[in-house]
Image (spheres, grey):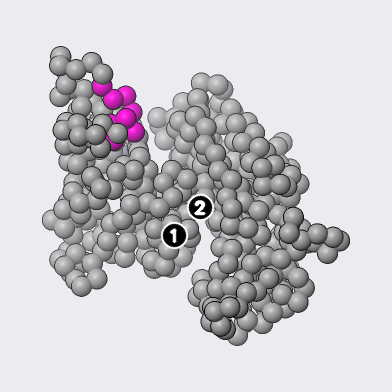
Amino acid sequence: MSSTGATTVEARSLLWTPSDSVKDVNRRKVIRAAMADPGITQVSLAKRLLLSQGTVSAVVSELQQEGIFRVQSEEGERGKRVRLGAVRGVAVGVEVNHDRIAVAARRVDTSAVEYESVAFRADQGSSSWVRESANLIKELTVQTGLDIDHIVSIGVGIPAAVDPRTALVTQVAASLDWDITGSVPERFRDHFRDVPIIVDNEANYAAYGEHLYGAGRGAGTMLFVKASVGLGAGFIIGGLIYRGRHGYGGEIGHLTMDPDGIPCRCGNRGCLETLVGGARLLEQVRQAYAGYRADLPTSVEGMIERAKRGDAVCRRVLQDAARTIGLALARVCNLMNPELIVLGGELGRAPELLLEPMMDGLRLYALRGMVESKDPVKIVGSDLGLAAGARGALGFALMTDRTVEA
Ligand SMILES: [Zn+2]
């Protein structure tokens, strides 16, 4: 610990002690933002929190006097950087996926993130994902040098739509054969009794991760596309996650591309996912090589590796998929006009192969002004890779002051 002695404050009590006075609310906002983004400048704090410079400056100097903040001002007044002082706490983010569980943990007074991802097998029982997540959270918390009593909050991203007003699961993907329904925080109660658990869709959290820590830093409106076995997306508008009324905001994978197309796992027909989902891509490679090759890729990851090594079939299938995703993105752009699109998930591992064809698809169908302006909409690869979801869950759970929206 960099700070010791009886004056060390518990981060959890700083953030979750109820008080509605404007002063306390602003104080908590500033502390939250400084925990979520260690070393943030005072100017950025004001911008992110929509508070005046004066308000932030007053709160920061009060917290500095209490030893809660350390302020470095080597770059002058505007460059004042804020870090936590004598505060003890660890923030946690979890991303649960069809085949993987990833956890990020970080002490609130440092930038060093502990991260681990393990393969997840749903056939271990319907609640195994909770048990496995809890074990990984405990393991990584210990690696930060603290124990689970010091956990401030846990963000949990799940592959399902989550109602923002109740934090209950709205709809589980029909393809999941494990049980994720109901109240996720209740399921974690036995493991982490008094810790606020903040639940959201995993693509929303990945979008937030890129917004806060990755390729989307500074973008006012951003669309994050997660292209793996399935296709998800998350919208960040003005620093907030856009979820919509039922939590379906960003379900790009189920955009209807062909009303007469093949059935989708959601029950509709011709969704984008039926054209470019992982299973469809692998099937195309299988068909192309049928009777000629036996050593075929069995995962999207394997396919990308082959494409990078020059396999012409894998390359063609992936690049055509990227073009089709670009067409879907053009529709989204014509509706929402984002500043930036970040490509993540498995396909985000090969930006050198896929960004160009994706941009081609976008250019063909997006309104001219968006793609031909001096400052056109951009598509970039993810910075955080497959850690985006867990990192974003960690950051969002720190930033939010409520466990449900309403
Ligand atoms: Zn669908």
In the image, taking residue 40 as reference, residue 108 lies left or right, namely right
| Quadrant position of the N terminus in the picture | bottom right
Q: Is residue 99 above or below residue 60?
A: above
Q: Amino acid at mark 2?
A: Gly
Tally the marks. Answer: 2
- Mark 2–mark 1 Cα distance, whole angstroms, equals 8 Å
Q: Which numbered disc, 2 or 1, marks the residue that appears first in the sequence?
A: 1
Q: Is residue 4 visible?
A: yes
Does the magenta run of residues contain 23?
no
Please state the horizontal and vertical placement of residue 82, each as a whole percent of the image: 62, 71
Q: Residues within 10 Å of mark 1 (few under 14, many from 20)?
A: many
Please provide the residue range marked out in magenta.
296-304
Residue 83 quadrant:
bottom right
Q: Is residue 163 visible?
A: no
Does the magenta run of residues contain 303?
yes
Please state the horizontal and vertical placement of residue 171, each as a whole percent of the image: 45, 40
Q: Can you identify the residue that label 2 sits on?
A: 392
Q: Secondary structure at mark 2?
A: helix
Q: Can you identify the residue that label 1 sits on?
A: 211
Q: Amino acid at mark 1?
A: His
Given contact means CB atoms under 8 Å apart, are the residues at marks 2 and 1 in contact?
A: yes
Residue 20 quadrant:
bottom right
